[in-house]
Image (spheres, rainbow, N blue to C red):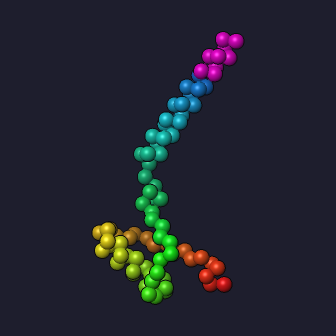
């Protein structure tokens, strides 16, 4: 019976330590998704990919004084079919 209690306490302690380390690693690791923004329902004068990209880059530079490294344009497929 003592071994069961000791094993249980050890497993709880082990789980706690693993959980704490996972949180610490997650907080310290920087991934590309940490720097991503998703915009929805954007309105553009011209919806061509190049013109939309220019407008987004211009807006981000003027409003937030930051550069856009990569722009991935996704579209709702039902808008086209």
Please name the residue shown 66% across and 11% down the image.
Answer: 2
Judged from this view, the residue extending furthest toward the right is 1
Judging depth in this view, the residue of 42 and 31 nearest the camera is 42
Residue furthest top in the image:
2
User: Which quadrant of the structure image shows residue 63?
Assistant: bottom left
Whether residue 48 can be seen here: yes
Locate residue 28 relative to residue 78 in the image: left or right: left
Relative to 50, say whether 35 is above or below.
Answer: above
Q: Magenta segment, principal secondary structure?
A: helix
Q: Is residue 7 above or below residue 31?
A: above
Magenta-span inclusion, residue 75: no
Query: Which residue does the image show at 52% across and 31% down from the upper left?
Result: 17
Quadrant the C terminus occupies: bottom right
Residue at 55%, 74% (x, y): give it: 74
Residue 41 locus on image (x, y percent): 50, 75
Residue range (magenta): 1-9
The magenta stretch spans residue 7: yes
- Determine the image quadrant of residue 62: bottom left
Q: Is residue 61 left or right of residue 25?
A: left
At 55% from the left and 25% from the top, the residue drawn is 13
Can residue 50 be seen in the rendering of this structure?
no
- As drawn, is 78 to the left or to the right of 70? right
Rendered view: 9 above or below 61: above
The quadrant of the picture occupied by the N terminus is: top right
Compared with residue 81, is residue 29 higher up or lower down, i.e. above or below? above
């Amino acid at each position: 019976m003592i071994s069961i209690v000791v094993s249980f306490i050890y497993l709880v302690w082990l789980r706690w330590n693993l959980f704490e380390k996972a949180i610490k690693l997650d907080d310290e690791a920087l991934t590309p998704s940490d720097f991503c923004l998703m915009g929805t329902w954007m309105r553009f004068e011209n919806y061509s990919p190049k013109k939309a990209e220019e407008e987004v880059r211009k807006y981000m530079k003027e409003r937030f004084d930051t550069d856009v490294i990569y722009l991935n344009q996704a579209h709702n497929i039902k808008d086209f079919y």
